Image (tube, rainbow, N blue to C red):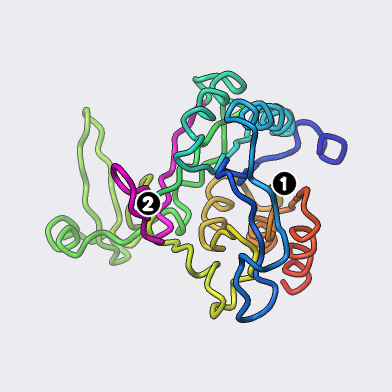
Amino acid sequence: MGAHVESGSVELAYLDPPFAVGTKFAARTRLGQARAHGEPAYDDTWPSLDAYLAWLDARLRVVRETLSPRHGSMWLHLDHRAVHDAKSLCDGIFGRESFIGEIIWLPGNGTKARKGPGITHHTLLVYARGDEPIWNATDPMLREPYAKTSQSMHFKRKDAKGRRYRERTIAGRTYRYYADNGRAIGSVWSDCPAMVANTPLRKESTGYPTQKPLKLLERIVRASSREGALVMDPFCGSGTTLVAAKKHGRRFFGCDIGALAIKTARKRLEEA
């Protein structure tokens, strides 16, 4: 990867690596086919968690070097199996002070019976390389409408253009909020269901296992990069990040160790 991407050239890197699930994944390559009997996609078995973390550590270090030293950020997408250990890795590689925050994504797939609370979320760790990571806070994909009760109670004033607003004074400073701008969506994302990417009857689905919904990647791309910037996905899988980047006017680079992933991503990009 380092041979193909110039050091310091990437504004956003999204990583959706194997999760250390302990199984092999196959793809649904024709309608009606069960994934279990489909074409092999990738192997997510490891001798130990330490072996997995050592593998991940090496790749995180390469990714950091590709990021813009001023504006670059990395999103690492994992689940409960390894995310807490990976957080420690990232703290060591990027510096704990470079941790921007985390997003909790709710795929909406339900949960299996287990001892203890059911696990129904993924965690995306967000790290910056430099002091000015891109965060497009006012982008519509990072906003949601104010609740109707809030709009009726607080947004009672109008400006010269007829826009409804409210003002709040905090520590001696007055801030104006417009109703039509909406509010920040926060760190728990429940409106990007996984089923749109994993259900055979939906046009978005490619049959590739663990495919993420396009809406999720569109939001990430628009949140942490600018038009014309370079977006990178070193575990591109079905190519969702690349399609999102193309759709929103970003340059993109993706790679994957699996032949099926490359074939699937290339087909999606050609169709896009």
**Residue 114 painted magenta:** yes
Magenta-drawn stretch, dominant element (helix, strand or loop): loop
**Residue 120 tag number:** 2
Q: Residue at x 36, y 50 (%)?
A: 184
Task: Characterize the local packing of mark 1: few (<14), some (14-19) or many (20 or more) Cα atoms within 10 angstroms.
Answer: many
Residue occupied by mark 1? 230
At mark 1, the secondary structure is strand
**Residue 6 tag number:** none
| Amino acid type indicated by mark 1 | Leu
Q: Residue 109, image x and y in percent?
A: 41, 61
The one of 74 and 42 positioned closer to us in this rendering: 42
The one of 184 and 138 positioned closer to us in this rendering: 184
| Sequence-first tag of 1 and 2 | 2
Position of 49 relative to 239 (above/below):
above
Q: CA distance from mark 1 to mark 2?
A: 32 Å
| Image quadrant where residue 158 sits | bottom left
Q: Residue 271, image x and y in percent?
A: 74, 74
- Residue 228 left/right relative to 170: right
Kindly tell me whether residue 14 is visible in this rendering.
no
Kindly tell me whether residue 166 is visible in this rendering.
yes
Quarter occupied by the C terminus:
bottom right
- Toward the right, the furthest residue is 3
Q: Residue 263, image x and y in percent?
A: 79, 64
- Residue 199 left/right relative to 51: left
Q: Nearer the viewer, mark 1 or mark 2?
A: 2
Numbered range of the magenta stretch: 99-119
Q: Residue at x 53, y 48 (%)?
A: 223
The one of 149 and 13 positioned closer to us in this rendering: 13
| Amino acid type indicated by mark 2 | Thr
Q: Residue at x 28, y 47 (%)?
A: 176
**Residue 66 painted magenta:** no
